[in-house]
Amino acid sequence: MGRLSRSLTEAVWTVGGRLPRRAGDLIARALSWPLALLPLPGVRAWQGSVEAATGERPRPGTRRLLLENWLRNTLWSLSLAHWTDDEILAVASITDEEVDRLRESLAGPGLVLALPHMGSWDFAGAWCATVGIKVVSVAERLPDGLYERFRDARAGMGMDIHPVDLPGLLGVLTDDVRAGRLVCLLSDRDLSSRGVGVPWPGTDAEVGVPAGPALLARRTGADLRVASTRFEGGRLRIRVSERIDGDSARELMAGAVAVFADHIAEAPGSWLMLRRYFR
C-alpha cells in the first residue's frame, strides 16, 4: 500500500469513526442517488445475483437502496465502537421470541449462527454485546494492517475476532462454544476450496458455502441457526431462525441456505453481495 493509499485509509477511519449515526445515514442516502446512475461493476454483479436468486430483476429503486445500505453498513462499522448502549438498543428491532431462541440455545447445548452478508452484521454483534451475549467471529487477514484495524474496532464493540488462517481454528472455536460464547460466521460465500455445494432453492443452481458452521455445530452438539439483518427505515431488523436440523454438514448448510434465500427474497436491497454469486 502506497503512502497516498495509507493516508486515505487513515482519513476514512478517522472521519468515519467520529461521524454521528444520523449524519452518516444522511450522507449515505445523499450519495446513493448519484452513485446509482453510474455503471458500477459491483452493482451489476449484484443485480445478476439477485435476479438468479429470486427470479426477479431488481428495480432501479432497489439498486439505489442497495448503495445506501452498503454505505450505511460501512459507516456504522467504523463508528459503532462509539455508540452508546441506549442508541444501539433504540436502533435494534428483534422480537422477544427471537431473543429467547438465542438465550435458550446458549443456556443449553451452545449456539453457532450462520449469517449472510446482509444489513449490518457488525451492528448485530454490537447489540449482542450490549445485552450481555459474548460474540466471537472470524475474519479474513487483510493486508497492510487493515485486519488489525477491523479486529480492534470490533473489540471496541465487545466482540472477539479470530483470523481465518489461525492454526487450529476449529479447536479454538470449539472452546468458545463450550464456554458459552456465541459464534457467528458469515456463511453465504466460500472463501476456501473446502466448502460444500448446496442447492439454491427454486433454481437449478448449486452454490459453494463454507462447511465450518455445520462442522462446528456437529462437533460441539451446539444448535445451528441463521441470523440475518436488514435495514428498515432508521432501524435494523435482526432475525433469528428456528434450529437447523440435518444429518450431515451438507444437509445442515442446505437448510441454512434455504433460510438465506427466503430472507434475501424479502429484502434484496440489504444483501450486500457486490460480486457474482452464481457460477
Image: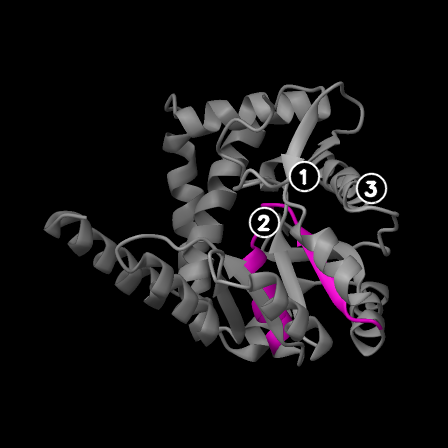
Q: Residue at label 2?
A: 119
| Residue 220 x, y percent position in the rendering | 77, 66
Q: Which residue is painted at 72% across and 19% down in the image? A: 55
- Residue drawn at 46 percent across, 56 percent down: 165
User: Which residue sits furthest front?
Assistant: 168
Quadrant where the C terminus is found in the figure? top right
Mark 3 — residue? 251
* Secondary structure at numbered mark 3: helix
Does the magenta run of residues contain 121? Answer: yes
Question: Which residue is nearer to you in this view: 186 or 165?
Answer: 165
- SS under mark 2: loop
* Amino acid at circle 2: Gly
Region rendered in magenta: 109-129
- Binning the other alpha carbons within 10 Å of mark 1 as few (below 14), some (14 to 19) or many (20 upward) gives some
Circle 1: residue type: Ala
Is label 2 or label 3 in front? 3
Compute the Cα span from label 1 to label 3. 25 Å
Foreground label between 1 and 3: 3
Residue 193 image point, x, y percent: 55, 38
Quarter of the image for residue 37 reads: top left
Whole-percent x and y of residue 276?
Answer: 52, 26
Residue drawn at x 79%, y 58% is 218
Q: Is residue 69 above or below residue 129?
A: above
Of callouts 2 and 1, the N-terminal one:
2
Tag 2 near tag 1, CB within 8 Å: yes
Would you name the residue on which mark 1 appears? 267
**Above or below — where is 147 with respect to 30?**
below
Which structural element holds mark 1? loop
Residue type highlighted by circle 3: Glu
* Residue 152 lies within the magenta run: no
Residue 60 in view in this figure: no
